[in-house]
Image (cartoon, helix red, strand yellow):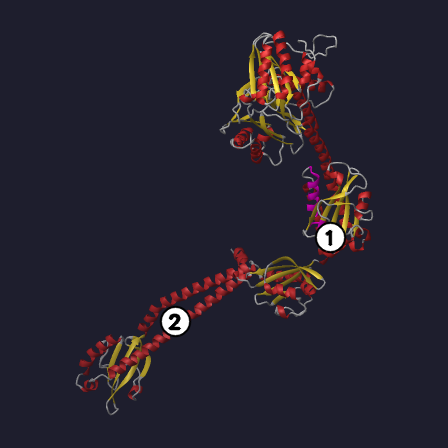
Amino acid sequence: MRSLLGSKFRSVAGQVFVLQVAIVVLLAASALLALVLQSRHDIDREARNRSVSVAQTFAHSLGLQDTLKSADPSAVLQPLAEKTRKAAGVDFIVVMDTKGIRYSHPQPERIGQRFVGTIEPSLAGQTYTESVDGPLGKEIQAVVPVTAPDGRVVGLVSAGLTVKSVTGVVDRQLPVILLAIATGLALATAGTALISRRLRRQTHGLGTQEMTRMYEHHDAVLHAVREGVLITDGEGRLLLANDEAKRLLGLPEDAEGRRIGDVPGLDRPMADLLLSGRETTDEVLESGDRLLVVNQRSTHPGGRPEGCAVTIRDSTEMQVLTSRAETARRRLKLLYDAGGDIGTSLDVVRTAEELASVAVPRFADFCTVDLADPVLGGDEPGPGADMRRTAVSGIRPDHPLYPLGRLIDFLPSTPQARGYGTGEAELVPDLSDAPGWVAQDPPRARAILDYGIHSLIAAPLRARGVVLGVVNFWRSEKPEPFDEDELSLAEELVARAAVSMDNARRYTREHALAETLQRSLLPRALPEQSAVDVAHFYLPAQSGVGGDWFDVIPLPGSRVALVVGDVVGHGLHAAATMGRLRTAVHNFSSLDLPPDEILARLDDLVQRIDHDAVSDGVTGGVLGATCLYAIYDPVSQGCTVARAGHLPPLLVAPDGTTEIMELPAGPPLGLGGMPFETAEIHLAEGSQLVLYTDGLVEERTRDIGEGLELLRGALSHPDRDPQESCQAVLDLMLPVRPADDVALLIARTRTLGADRVAQWDVPYEPSAVGAVRKAAAEKLEEWGLTELVFATELILSELVTNAVRHGSAPVRVRMLHDHALTCEVWDGTSTAPHLRYAATTDEGGRGLFLVAQLSEHWGVRYTPEGKVIWAEQALPGSSDGAEPGLAAFLDVDPL
């Protein structure tokens, strides 16, 4: 217990609590004693005063003197005295004569006996009080004379209280006094406890010795630490300043206690900061030739701001080191960001723009990138090449530097030309003192200097031993010129960008070669034909050209073939393969084969290409190819379609109904082993047939089903022509950066009316030839083609004669009046005719030769029922028209 109490009351707060409690108890005891004594004194005085009052009142009562003169005063006075005593609250009223003989007493047996007390002063006419031991015990009594009108004392009256009665009153008041004292003691103790508790918090329970040691240590640390410490109060008065603060701020020894504004030697910025009371963290202030780092925090004792605690440290040397470290950090950050921000695309111009954007304003105020002109086309630059300003970036747009796109021929005296020639960066600290640079364009140089640009770094873009151009860094805002450290940074920055620039250049070259090859293999202009109105679009992929292609191939009989295909992959190999397939399609189309047979031949070709690649040990055969081939006949309005793994076409009816054609899928080209199937459909005039590749409908953000629905929605407007429909599709569906080639072909069908078609069934006999010639001549007259009558009669005579003599029934003749005049002769055999070159002594063999001489084109196509021999003649007045030669008059031998 002693140990517990000792530890508890060892602290300053505990000792103060014990002392305060002892003082409170002593004060309470003293107050109790004083209250008891005062009570007793007051009650004694009250008893004397009451005794005097009662005695005087009774002594002056009416009839008292007469009663004293009566024969038996006691008989009257005893009852009256007792009644008055009880009413007045005293213990006795005694009436006596001048000799002290009682006439009344609370104890009747005491009547007639001598009064106990002093009566002499009262006989002398005075009121006298005293404390005596009377019949009732210890008594406090007053003796009052009863005087006659002449002033003579005729009797005495005594009234009083016993000490027991007086003590009883005090005893009855004592519990109240003790309760009040106890309450006060408790409140005082509680207040002392609260004060001691707060003192314990403020002193952290430390004892006197500990507080002494803490003060000594605090004082030693405060004055020995190499950091200034200031403490101010809420009224702007300096309460404390340690030695370091006085040294850093130049304060006098008597600075403590003064108002901050009156402290001599304190700089105005520091004084303003101290008086403001605002919180600061590592705020740098200049004080003379020092850079001071100031931290200021408000102190809040009791929750009220009462001042500030301030720490100050000298950071002059640290600031220099920090500035250098910060400069190095910014440069490293610039190079790091350049690695991520430059070369995000394989585009030369975009890479140059990224380089200029990274440099401004973090390194230079203006940055211009000048590339050798061949670099923009992907070529390798040669010595002395002119440079084109490819990118410009600056802090303001109104600079006087050469504008974007300007072709510049730098003089040999300029740092740009020297850097381009040597591959070494050059630093021009002062442009006004660089006559070689000024000589390039004196008026512009003067405008640049007047604008405020004063320093330059010209760093060549050198990658893989080739200088691609020069990057110019210009400074205008900072008055300091570029230095050697910044020259090194510029060289490092440009070296990193040069690799990305060269990669973009090489890609540009390869991409341009592949795109040139691909576009040269695609149709530059669609051939003349009247079966369909066509609109088309092709866009190579952003990552490189691919193998998508389309074609429109005119066929005999006013028919037209619509083709679209896709070779898997990108680059030169895919483009070259696409060219081979397109050429093959043209060759197979010249044979006038149906779509399924053309796809079968393409399939064989792709297999041979893959086989040859494997045989030669070359990787990269045809990874996959798809194709869709459609033939439309404007006379019959029939369309025959076959596909090899390609997406089916969309058909837009004249009323706007859009549907996907139901076609047999067919395997992709090159798989082999499975035949291709065709589908035939009748197309109303004005229908639109839409052929496309998967790059249009398939994208990473949507699947192919969503793409087809978007395509259908874009095409459901029959009032648009093919070109408008094509543009509507592209506006809705064309990706910004397509990952695959996009090919689109829209053909709106037309018909060759009955007034431009003539057809006759020919009897299977030689005499029918004359009737055919006559009917043909009449039809040509009707069409206004009189000039073609002679040649047409000869062509039909030879073809019909050969069909009757060497073919089989049925024989049919058809003439088509389109962009050319086409004569077709059907028969029921599949015997192939051959063109012969007959000798001068031969009697026959000149039939087809004559047909070939009289027509622009001729040929044979086979049908399920036999074959058709056709011949086309150019219409009069057309650029393809020609006069029949002498061979037209030679004899014609049968086939």
Q: Position of residue 531 (x, y in %)?
A: 58, 24
Does residue 356 show up magenta in the picture?
yes
**Label 2, residues with CA under 10 Å away: few <14, some 14-19, many ≥20:** some
Of 227 and 358, nearer the camera is: 358
- Report if residue 727 lies within the magenta region: no
Q: CA distance from mark 2 to mark 1?
A: 99 Å
Q: Secondary structure at mark 1?
A: strand
Q: Is residue 859 above or below residue 59?
A: above
Q: Is residue 391 above or below residue 641?
A: below
Residue 609, visible in the rendered structure? yes
Figure quadrant of residue 315? bottom right
Q: Which residue is mark 2?
A: 36
* Mark with earlier residue (2, 1): 2
- For badge 2, the amino acid type reads Val
Quarter holding residue 233: bottom right
Q: Position of residue 1 (x, y in %)?
A: 51, 55
What is the number of the mark on residue 501?
Answer: none
Pick whichever, 365 or 312, lies toward us. 365
Label 1 is placed on what type of residue?
Answer: Arg
Residue extent of the magenta highlight: 346-366
Q: Residues within 10 Å of mark 1 (few under 14, many from 20)?
A: many
User: Which is in the foreground here, disc 2 or disc 1?
Assistant: 1
The reply, left or right, for residue 807 in relation to residue 446 is: left
Q: Secondary structure at mark 2?
A: helix
On the question of residue 158 being in view, the answer is no
Front-most of 403 and 849?
A: 849
Say which residue label 1 marks.
475
**Occupied quadrant, residue 510:** top right
Q: Which of the pair 257/375 is nearer the observer? A: 375
